[in-house]
Image (cartoon, rainbow, N blue to C red):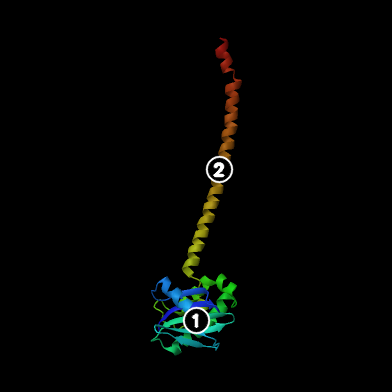
Amino acid sequence: MVVLSAAITTKNGKALLARQYVDMSRIRIEGLLAAFPKLMGTGNKQHTFIDTESVRYVYQPMESLFLLLITNKASNIVEDLETLRMLSKIVPDVAGGITEEKISNHCFELVFAFDEALTVGGLRENVTLPQIKSNLEMDSHEERLHNMIQDSKREAAKDEAMRKATEMKARQKAMQAAGLGGMQGIGGGGGMQGIGGG
């Protein structure tokens, strides 16, 4: 089985999301997606497929949208339906519903989830929905450790900056006290008057 593209479209064919798993031009995928509503007809079964000369469309209605897999003709229809079933569980779980707005708001999360279910070559991964959710939410120990070190460095730098600022203020006060006293001594000593008067 090779999935060429996984897409979510409206009933009239507007693509909300399309993820390609094999190298194909934008014009070709847009053409395939635009052809889908014309080929579909009026059938509204739970799982359906349409064969064309070059590809197979495997789709499932999801409220006002369609979840669509475009596969090659040699693809195993049973595996295609399994993949479609998995993706149909992923969509409402990741997007929080099946509306055009929710799909648009969560398109990147959906692409990441689709990528967990399908490989780059368009082959289905042997994963379950809980495994996909776990992979999407995966917490890296190294990342957490790195973030803790960075936070520690920021705090140390902040503390050092505060200490240096306090030192500088104390030095400035000391210099002002010494400088003001020195200025009064120079100006108050009458050095200029003594030079000018004599």
Secondary element at image label 2 = helix
Quadrant containing the C terminus in the rendered view: top right
Q: Secondary structure at mark 1?
A: helix
* 104 is higher (above) or lower (below) than 73: above
Q: CA distance from mark 2 to mark 1?
A: 77 Å
x and y percentages locating residue 108 in the rendered image: 51, 70
Q: Position of residue 57 (x, y in %)?
A: 46, 83
Residue kind at label 2, given as amino acid type? Glu
* Whether residue 137 can be seen here: no
Is residue 58 shown to the viewer in this render?
Answer: yes
Lower sequence index among marks 2 and 1: 1
User: What residue lies at 58% left-to-right and 10% top-to-bottom?
Assistant: 197
Residue at 58 percent of width and 31 percent of height: 178
Task: Please provide percent x and percent y for residue 46.
Answer: 55, 88
Q: Nearer the viewer, residue 142 or 130?
A: 130
**Label 2: few (<14), some (14–19) or many (≥20) C-alpha neighbours in 10 Å:** few
Decide: is 169 above or below 135. Answer: above
Label 1, on which residue? 38
Q: Quadrant of the N terminus?
A: bottom left
Residue under the image location 58 percent in, 14 percent down:
193
The amino acid type of the residue labelled 1 equals: Lys
Which residue is found at the position 57% from the left and 14% from the top? 194
Q: Which residue is mark 2?
A: 167
- Residue nearer the viewer, 87 or 48: 48
**Which numbered disc covers residue 62?**
none
- Which of the two marks, 2 or 1, is nearer to us in this view? 1
Residue 118 placement: quadrant: bottom left
